[in-house]
Image: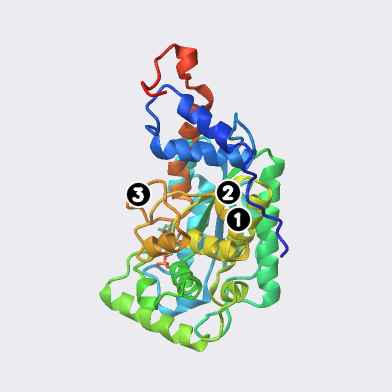
Amino acid sequence: MGYKIFPPKKDLLSELIEKVNGKTKPVGALGRLEQIAIQIGLIQQSLSPVLNKPYILVFAGDHGIAREGVSAYPQAVTHQMVNNFLSGKAAINVFARQNAIGLKVIDAGVNYDFDPHVLLTRHKVDYGTRSFLHEKAMTKEQLQQALDYGEVAVDEIKSLGANIVGFGEMGIGNTASASMIMSRICGLELIHCVGRGTGLNDVQLQNKFGVLRAALDRHADVTDPLEVLQTFGGYEIAQMCGAMLRAAELQMVLLIDGFIATAAFLVAQQLCPAIKAYSVLCHQSEEKGHQQMVDFLKMKPLINLNMRLGEGTGCAVAYPIVNSAITFFNEMASFTEAGVSNRIDQ
Ligand SMILES: O=C(O)c1ccc[n+]([C@@H]2O[C@H](COP(=O)([O-])O)[C@@H](O)[C@H]2O)c1
Ligand SMILES: Cc1cc2nc[nH]c2cc1C
């Protein structure tokens, strides 16, 4: 712990706003793109911000709670999908390639031994968490190791020149984890936090709710954010949390994916509220509960495409929009440069 995250200095704010308003467009006409340009200008303390070497980190982990029938898919899908990422054929590979985003897959705690691969980092804390229906998902030491591994992953891409990073995940059962974290951190009844994940039917959803209700009661005394993460988290969620905190400390731009990534972000912002100034919620997930997570954070996702895949796909799809914000800010002509008349009341 002890992350040094401070809100970006506001000294440049009025110049950034002036530059946006000086572009050849009615004031405010580029909407959210204008806000993103100003946000990144403040993060980088620059009137000419740049996006360098974007990366998406996909953290994978298995969950003891998956044994309780809380997912529509078997646990083996976690390692099978990791192999799919390594083959370059999954949704995240396709979108990352399309938008020239680098990809790293991190084995945070998958119940499988992978062959070495250039895209794969072995940061395995264990072969899956324990079931939080019966005990805490991980020990304090394992939580600390996971947070530390997350930091290392960000340090690595930073040393490759990245100043913008997206956070995604893969882990069968991890919507259950994310729902528990959400319920405790947002102080919301479980009913508002539990959804169908990979596609549970009504009966399966009732079972998931019953399991999570019992688990929440078992750990009724757990409220401290780090203890919430230790109790209900997955290794991929904990590593994302550590990675997000490190990225903000390094004054990078953070792209946050869907329901599970936002749960990791919930913990991070409890520890260091200033992280929000460095972050963009990329998309509104279809998973029930995400809307209320977003409301709790008082943030606004960039897009809503009714997606609920995970893997960092929301980050990859939203990235070109963030890039558009930087590009208009740097390249578009001002009224003066283009000889276009400004507002009548100017
Ligand atoms: O990112 C999201 O919003 C999202 C919403 C629902 C499901 N997922 C993905 O589906 C998996 C978890 O679903 P489940 O049903 O196994 O808990 C995990 O691999 C996530 O990446 C992801
Ligand atoms: C096939 C599949 C792909 C995924 N990608 C992220 N979570 C996933 C869950 C499943 C089941």
Residue 77 percent coordinates (x, y)? 45, 63
**Element at badge 1?**
helix
- Tag 2: Cα neighbours inside 10 Å, few (<14), some, or many (≥20)? many
What residue do we see at 60% from left, 76% from top? 224
Nearer to us in this view, 11 or 83: 11
Mark 2 highlights which residue? 278
- In this view, 28 is above or below 132: above
- Tag 1: Cα neighbours inside 10 Å, few (<14), some, or many (≥20)? some
Visible in this render: residue 114? no
Q: CA distance from mark 2 to mark 1?
A: 8 Å
Nearer to us in this view, 241 or 60: 241
Q: Quadrant of the C terminus?
A: top left
Tell me which label, 3 or 2, sits earlier in the chain: 2
Mark 3 highlights which residue? 304
Mark 1 highlights which residue? 274
User: In this image, 224 relative to 339: left or right?
Assistant: right
Where is ligand 2, by quadrant? bottom left
